[in-house]
Image (tube, helix red, strand yellow):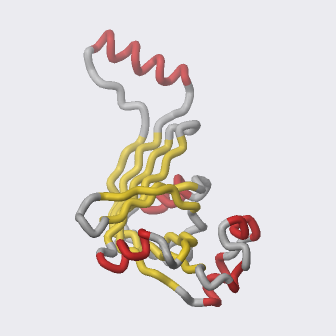
Amino acid sequence: MHQHGHNDPNAAKLYELIKDVKIAMMTTVETDGTLHSRPMHSQDADEHGDLWFFTQIQSPKMTEISRDSEVNLAYSDPKTQTYVSVSGKAEIVRDKAKIEEKWSEPLRAWFPKGTDDPQIALIRVHPAKGEYWDSPSSTLVHLYGYAKAVVTGEQPKPGDQAKVNLS
């Protein structure tokens, strides 16, 4: 069990929903205050519930995180109708042992020199809060919800939604 959110019963479900979603949109704050999002390959959450990403040292997000460490991560799996948003503080990690621990060979496409690449770093996100939307992916369930809404005039409640305290 992850330590983040240990007092929130929905934390385990949030982590379960994102464990197989490999791309997250990471949003940072640019120097002019505007928001900047980009896709990032998500590593598995660690035993503390922190979320990890590889990055190049010389990238705009490194400057943005150094100036303002608040980030948001958006995970989406339309096939399963699963959507998760996580916000927290990002930290730049240059620890060689941690880079080697998190390394997988497909990363060589971005880091040709492997873990010895001088441009390699990690971003660790310490989650503070999150929210998830988990709906049944069945077309029949969605059609039923639509029909019920038309007949009753009420919005369907097709799945689970919860705000999660992860700090």
Question: Which quadrant of the figure has residue 28?
Answer: bottom left
* 32 versus 67 height, above or below: above
* Rendered-image quadrant of the C terminus: bottom left
Which of 53/164 is in front? 53
Q: Where is residue 76 in the image (x, y as percent from the top left)?
A: 49, 46
21 to the left or right of 87: right
How many marks do you count on the picture?
0
Q: Where is residue 163 in the image (x, y as percent from the top left)?
A: 32, 54
Q: Where is residue 86 in the image (x, y as percent from the top left)?
A: 39, 60
128 to the left or right of 136: left
* 38 versus 104 height, above or below: above
Residue at x-position 38% and y-position 76%? 63
Residue at x-position 66% and y-position 82%? 117
60 to the left or right of 113: left
Q: Residue furthest left?
A: 33
Q: Residue furthest right?
A: 105
Which of 54/85 is in front? 54
Residue at x-position 40% and y-position 75%? 90
Q: Which residue lies furthest to the top in this view?
A: 151
Residue at x-position 56% and y-position 39%? 80
Q: Position of residue 101 (x, y in %)?
A: 67, 81
Which of 32/39 is in front? 32
* 155 versus 162 height, above or below: above
